Each structure stands twice: as C-alpha cells, then as structure tokens.
C-alpha cells in the first residue's frame, strides 16, 4: 500500500507539474465602457476572438455597446464590416457616435451566404472587426468564426436572439442584454476567468446627441402621449442632460 | 547587343498538356486523313511505346486507350504570340523565329541583373506557365537561336566567343538554308567552322546569296532584320475543351490556366484589366456570357481567378460547354497598391481589395458598399452609397438603424425627445411634413417615430436607437 503523501510535499518537491493557462493579454481592445472593462478578465474585448451578444429584442442598446469600439477602430487602417445587418445603418446616426463611415463596409448577404462571408472577412486579416447577424448559426459555424477570428486577428461580434442562451457556444465572451427597466449587461461566459454574477448597467441616457451641447436646437418637450394602454408612463426630462 | 533565345521544342504539345489536369496518354497527329502519323506524344504515351512518326493505326494497335488530338499550326502560333507577350516583360525588342522567341537583353540587364540571374527568372516564368524550353545567349539573335538548338544554357558574350562556339556546331543544327545543309556534307563540310572559313565567292556561286546572308546574320556581319513583336491592345483567347463539360466545376482548371496566362500577359505589358468577358460556347450553338468586373484594375492571377470563378459558379448551363473564350478589350494601366514596409498583418492575409473582390464575386457586384450622407434632411434621402467622406454632423438625434420603409407603431411608449419638425421636399414632389420623436417602450426599445405634423396619432416607426 502506498503511504499517504501530503500534496504540499509533492508540490514542493516539484514532482507534480501544474498546468496554468497562459495569461491573456489585457486592455488591448477596451470596450469604451469602464464598468464593463473592469468586469472582464481581459479588461476589454477578447482580442482576435468571437464575442456573442444575446438580445431579447432589437433597439435596446446593442449597438451602443459597440459604438465606442467601432468609433475607435474605424479611425485605424483596417475597415469594420457589417455582414447582413437587420436594418440599414443610419449613416448620420453612426457618425454622431464618431464612426468614420469611410472605414465601415456593409456586406449584403442572404442567410446561407452570410456565415461564409463573415468567415472570409475574419480570416482575411484585413478587417479590424466583423459584426454579423446570423439567422441560423449552430455550434459548428460559430466555432468556425472563432477560429477565423483567431487566424485573421480580428474582433468578431455575433448578435443572436436570447433564446440561444441555453445552447453552448464556442464564443470567448457571451454577453446577454436585458431590460429591467434599464439596459443591463450580463456576462454569461468569459474566457480567462469566472463570469461575474453582477450585471453591469449600460448608461443609455447620455447618448442622445443634441441633448447636450445643442440643446437649444432641440425643442425638448416632455410630453405624455395618449396611448392605448394609457398606463402612467412618464418621459425622462431632457434638461438633465442639457445641464451636464 | 546581347540576344537571348528561348527555344520551344514542343510548343504544340505543351499548349495542350497545360490545360489537362491528368497525365493520361495523349498524342498529336497530323497528315492526310488516311495516313495520320504522330507528331508529338506526352511522357506516358511514349512510355507505352508510341513514338514520333508512327502511324496512328500502328499506335492504336499498340495501345488501347489514348487521346488523339490533331496538330493545329494556328494554335502553335497563338501560343508563340502569347509567350512573346510574356517575354516582353524583359525587353522591348522581342521577335519570333520558328519554334523560338529571341529578345534583346543587353539593356535589360541593368534592371533584371546579369545574364545568370535573368535566365533563372525567365526560366521560372516559362516553367510556371508549363512550357518546356531551351535557352542560350549570344551577341546575334540567329547565333543564340543556333546555340539554343545545340545545348541548353549556353551563353557567349563576345563576337570571338560566338565564332568559337559556332565552330563545332554540326551543319544539320545550323539552321542554314536546307539545300545547302543537304549538299555541304557531301562536299566534306560537316561543321559550321570550316564553312564560315570557306571562300565566299565560291559559296555564292554554288548556293546563291541566300546562304551567305544567313551566315552573315549568324555571325553578326549583316543585321538580323527581324520583325519585332508588338503586344496587342486587346485580348481574345479561346480554349477548346477536350471534352464536353456539363458541370461548371470542371471548368475551374482551364479557367485557372487562362487567368494565370492573363496575369502573365498583363505583367508583360505592365497593365491591368478591370473588366473582361468569359464566353462559354455551348453545343447548341448558343453562348453564355459571363461579364467579370472589378472595382479597380487588377493583374494578380489569384485575384482574377477568384473574381472569374465566383461569377462563373452562379451560372446555370443550358447545354454542355465546348469552348471557353476570354475577351478583354480595355486594358488600363495598373497602379499597385502601396503597402506598409512593416506590415503587422498575418502572413496569409488578403488585402482588403482582394477580400472585397472575393465577396463581390460570390454575393453580387453591389453587395459590398459604404454609406455616405447627403444634405437632404429627409431620412429616405439622407444617405446613399458613397465613397467620399463628409464631415457634417447633424445636431439632432438620429438613430443607428433606419427602416427602409416606415412601419406602423403600436403600443405604449413614452417620449424622450421631440418633436423635431421636418417639413421639406416640396421641390421634388416627395413632400414630407412630419414630427419626429425619440420614444421608448416598455421593452426598453428606443425608437425613432414620426406622425403627421401637429398631430399625435398614426405613429410610424422609422428607426431604432440600438
């Protein structure tokens, strides 16, 4: 019978090799949201990897989450590609957030071709980031995107419906957005660390351009709409931003 | 003067072999229909025992399965013209001789390096295109032509060295007029050296001025008087396929060859191609035309192939294809894209232009675009596909997603900003009188909605502040 050996003795004698994951590079791709950066183990987006963003509905701030990053990347040499976006991007709206439209390329592709297109763009190494809205994407196709992002040293963002949360995903980072009643970011999976349980609030109020500097140009009316439900909904007074 | 000669001993066969992917026995035959004989055979046919000059019937008795194609002198000439275009890259003075190309290289050496280096690069170009060749250099074009026939890689740089090199050349390889080559050995003259030293007046009397002229051109006493090759300004090439092709995938190999030929040709004339036409000639007499257009002139073989292949793959064939034809009328100048000396991208990276061509080839010509803004405030007209930049920033809130067509909006909401009155467009009949609001609903969706000016019903959704 083998004698009982304390684990610490084995470790001290260097007879047991302990594997450690290589530390991930930190802070190379800041998200532009300090609270989110602080919560992520890479202190920013995982570089050259796939990030999956799960949404309950369109228009809850999913682009706003990325716009600081896109504004930063489009100032560089490599373009950012939007593959099969669900709506037409509003050029002025993007420019208001500092995105250089000269480095923003839009690719129209049908549901079958879009994963091919996204993979080609990521693998080419000539794109800074690729944003894709796949209609149907299984585990295998996402894994292909993840590998392609690694090969082409590009950021990949995939927007999907929240119902896919239950399925496993090869993405390096999975974020879920929820609204209750303000937009919250839940980190569901992140490579290189445990996902923090705490949700991060996405500050959306400060983003309406024109409500700050150009407040005088906008006739801000705090108005209660007549609506079918007639519930007591109150608007957010815009003077709050105008003062800042 | 220094001339290089590229001797192409089996031009016809190479021209056929290079568009075949496999190595099954193949022979070229020529002659009258009842007495066809083999004029060229590939390696596997020769290994099976077929030889040049053999009757086709005898060959068929020897080998059950082999492919027979007829020798086409027009095809040979076409290949020679094409290779002259490739060689044109190295010199502006290129001329054609039977089964050979000669080019003047004394001035090109300062650009391409000394003869050894330049020969290696020429050899590489020709080998990549799939043409066997022998090479020699000499101060006269005919001298180089004769030396290339004697041995591969001979190079002499002075008149004296040329004379010494020609001394030992047997007369049958001297490329002198045939009647003299036939008669001289019977007079005891078997090599070029003794012939060159013979008294000229006697030779002239016996063989005429023709022989003396040929000898003078050989040694450089007399100018060669060659017609120089001029590259044509348009490309019109045709490949006849050896089988009927019913499947586009089977066209990929000939297409690839054709595109690398086009790239080599374009490199020769330092140009590019922006749009060209592929014609698939079909058995029923019709032709399917596949136009290939790129955003900028290109000349890389890979780029051209990708662009052509992507468009070809979307073609539905109505009948089997017999031949593939390439027409390019417009060959603009080519400006290579500048690249960073210290490029940080991965080694296998494509340039963005290449990527864009690849995407366009598969997804359609209009599939990749950029947006720009216009000065029109109406959202329907406020943006267009554009390449130039504009720095105007709208002070009022604009969404990030815009719906192509406004949709009716229902449900409870509260206003975050608005109204923004938009009353314009009277000049082109598309009048807009709307009040725009930024609203948010209970699901947290932030939307850009409008209603008729002054009213507060009939809400239409026009964008999302995503």
Image (cartoon, coloured by chain):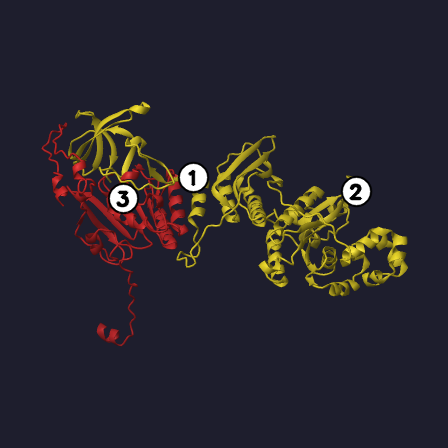
Chain colours: A red, B yellow
Say few, some or many: other residues with alpha carbon within 10 Å of mark 2 (under 14 / 14 to 19 / 20 or more).
few
**Which part of the image, by quadrant, shows the C terminus of chain B?**
top left
**Quarter where residue B30 is shown:** top right
Label 1: chain letter: B
Looking at the rendered structure, whether the residues under marks 1 and 3 are on a common chain is answered as no
- Relative image position of residue B197 (x, y in whole percent): 84, 62
Q: Is residue B460 above or below residue B238?
A: above
Q: Do labels 1 and 2 share a chain?
A: yes
Q: Are marks 2 and 3 on the same chain?
A: no
Tell me how far mark 2 sits from mark 3, CA to CA. 74 Å
Mark closer to the observer (1, 2): 1
Q: Quadrant of the N terminus of chain B?
A: bottom right
Residues B397 and B18: in front is B397
Provide the residue designation for mark 2.
B35
**Residue B37 pos. (x, y %):** 76, 46
Say which element carries label 1.
Answer: helix
> In what element is the residue under mark 2?
loop
The chain carrying label 2 is B
Q: In the rendering, at what x and y percent does residue A10 appear?
A: 25, 74
| Structural distance between the alpha carbons of marks 1 and 3 | 28 Å
Residue on which the image places disc 3: A164
Using the rendered view, name the quadrant where residue B461 is placed: top left
């Amino acid at each position: 019978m083998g004698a009982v050996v304390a684990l610490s003795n084995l470790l001290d004698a260097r007879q047991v090799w302990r594997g450690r994951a290589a530390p991930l590079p930190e802070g190379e791709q800041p998200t532009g949201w300090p609270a989110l950066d602080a919560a992520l183990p890479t202190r920013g987006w995982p570089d050259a990897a796939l990030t999956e963003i799960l949404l309950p509905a369109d228009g809850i701030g999913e682009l706003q989450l990325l716009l600081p990053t896109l504004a930063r990347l489009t100032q560089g040499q490599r373009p950012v590609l939007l593959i099969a976006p669900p709506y037409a991007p509003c050029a002025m709206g993007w420019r208001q957030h500092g995105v250089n439209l000269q480095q923003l390329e839009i690719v129209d592709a049908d549901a079958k071709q879009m994963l091919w297109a996204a993979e080609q763009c990521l693998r080419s190494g000539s794109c800074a980031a690729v944003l894709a809205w796949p209609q149907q994407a299984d585990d295998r196709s996402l894994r292909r995107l993840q590998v392609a992002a690694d090969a082409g040293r590009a950021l990949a963002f995939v927007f999907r419906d929240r119902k896919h949360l239950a399925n496993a995903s090869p993405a390096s980072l999975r974020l879920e957005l929820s609204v209750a009643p303000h937009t919250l970011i839940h980190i569901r999976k992140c490579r290189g660390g445990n996902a923090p349980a705490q949700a991060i609030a996405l500050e959306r109020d400060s983003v309406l351009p024109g409500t700050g500097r150009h407040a005088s140009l906008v006739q801000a009316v705090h108005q209660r709409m007549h609506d079918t439900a007639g519930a007591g909904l109150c608007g957010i007074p815009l003077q709050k931003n105008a003062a800042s | 003067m220094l001339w290089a000669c590229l001797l192409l001993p089996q031009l016809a066969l190479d021209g056929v072999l290079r568009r075949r992917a496999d190595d099954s026995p193949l022979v070229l035959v020529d002659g009258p229909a009842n007495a066809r004989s083999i004029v060229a055979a590939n390696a596997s046919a020769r290994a099976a025992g077929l030889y040049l000059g053999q009757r086709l019937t005898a060959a068929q008795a020897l080998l059950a399965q082999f492919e027979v194609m007829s020798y086409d002198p027009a095809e040979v000439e076409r290949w020679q013209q094409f290779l002259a275009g490739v060689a044109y890259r190295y010199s502006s003075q290129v001329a054609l001789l039977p089964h050979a190309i000669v080019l003047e290289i004394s001035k090109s050496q300062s650009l391409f390096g000394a003869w050894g280096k330049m020969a290696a690069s020429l050899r590489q170009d020709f080998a990549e295109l799939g043409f066997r060749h022998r090479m020699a250099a000499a101060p006269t074009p005919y001298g180089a032509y004769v030396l290339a026939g004697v041995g591969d890689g001979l190079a002499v740089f002075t008149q004296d060295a040329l004379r010494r090199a020609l001394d030992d050349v047997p007369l049958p390889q001297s490329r002198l007029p045939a009647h003299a080559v036939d008669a001289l050995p019977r007079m005891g003259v078997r090599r070029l050296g003794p012939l060159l030293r013979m008294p000229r007046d006697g030779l002239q009397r016996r063989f005429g001025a023709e022989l003396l002229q040929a000898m003078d051109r050989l040694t450089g006493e007399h100018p060669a008087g060659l017609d120089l090759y001029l590259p044509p300004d348009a490309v019109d090439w045709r490949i006849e396929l050896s089988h009927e092709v019913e499947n586009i995938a089977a066209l990929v190999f000939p297409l690839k060859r054709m595109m690398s030929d086009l790239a080599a040709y374009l490199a020769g004339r330092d140009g590019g191609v922006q749009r060209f036409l592929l014609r698939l000639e079909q058995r029923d007499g019709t032709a399917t035309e596949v136009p290939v257009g790129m955003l900028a002139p290109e000349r890389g073989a890979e780029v051209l192939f990708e662009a052509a292949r992507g468009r070809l793959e979307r073609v539905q064939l109505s009948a089997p294809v017999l031949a593939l034809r390439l027409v390019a009328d417009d060959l603009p100048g080519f400006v290579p894209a500048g690249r960073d000396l210290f490029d940080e991208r991965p080694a296998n990276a494509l340039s963005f232009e290449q990527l864009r061509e690849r995407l366009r080839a598969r997804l359609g010509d209009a599939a990749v675009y950029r947006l720009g803004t216009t000065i029109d405030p109406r959202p329907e007209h406020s943006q267009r596909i554009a390449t130039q930049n504009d720095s105007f920033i709208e002070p009022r809130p604009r969404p990030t997603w815009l719906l192509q067509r406004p949709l009716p909006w229902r449900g409870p909401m509260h206003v975050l900003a608005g109204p923004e009155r938009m009353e314009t467009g009277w000049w082109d009949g598309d009048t807009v009188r709307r009040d725009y609001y930024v609203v948010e609903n209970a699901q947290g969706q932030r939307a850009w909605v409008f209603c008729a000016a002054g009213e507060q019903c009939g809400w239409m959704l026009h964008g999302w502040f995503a």
